[in-house]
């Protein structure tokens, strides 16, 4: 596990969004950020230009039998995505 991935897991979670089976991943990400008070539609750079949502969607769709966890930083917030949830963690000064 990379240091960045480990750090995101050790930080305080500020939002968690449970995803419906048929809910598009990009909607779950947007709704999770809405819980933090970040409107992804008002950002200068839309997250689909930063994150390959199609690749994430395919990765998590094909992993139904084997649960996986993807971690990365978006809009200065470490986040974790699993098949059924999106978690956002508090940012730190060193990100």
Image: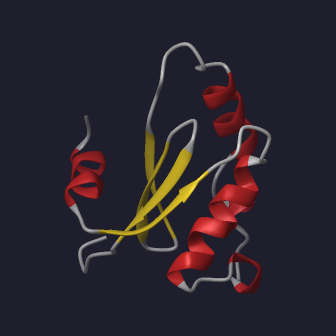
The residue positioned 19% from the left and 56% from the top of the image is: 10
Which residue lies most toward the top here? 65
Q: Is residue 89 above or below residue 66?
A: below
Nearest the viewer among 64 and 40 is 64
Q: Position of residue 8 (x, y in %)?
A: 29, 56
Q: Is residue 25 left or right of residue 70?
A: right
Quadrant including the C terminus: bottom left
Nearest the viewer among 53 and 17 is 17
Q: Is residue 7 above or below residue 32?
A: above
Q: Is residue 13 above or below residue 4?
A: below
Q: Is residue 5 left or right of residue 25?
A: left
The residue positioned 62% from the left and 77% from the top of the image is: 34
Q: Position of residue 87 (x, y in %)?
A: 45, 57
Q: Which quadrant of the figure has residue 64?
A: top right
Q: Position of residue 80 (x, y in %)?
A: 44, 50
The residue positioned 44% from the left and 36% from the top of the image is: 69
Q: Is residue 32 left or right of residue 62?
A: left
Q: Is residue 65 above or below residue 52?
A: above
Q: Which quadrant of the figure has residue 89?
A: bottom left
The residue positioned 51% from the left and 39% from the top of the image is: 82
Quadrant including the N terminus: top left
């Amino acid at each position: 596990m990379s240091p960045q991935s480990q750090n995101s897991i050790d930080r305080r979670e500020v939002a968690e969004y449970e995803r419906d089976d048929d809910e598009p991943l990009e909607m779950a990400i947007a709704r999770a950020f809405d819980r933090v008070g970040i409107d992804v539609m008002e950002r200068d750079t839309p997250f689909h230009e930063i994150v390959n949502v199609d690749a994430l969607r395919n990765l998590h769709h094909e992993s139904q039998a084997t649960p996986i966890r993807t971690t990365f930083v978006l809009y200065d917030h470490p986040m974790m995505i699993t098949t059924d949830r999106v978690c956002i963690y508090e940012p730190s000064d060193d990100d």
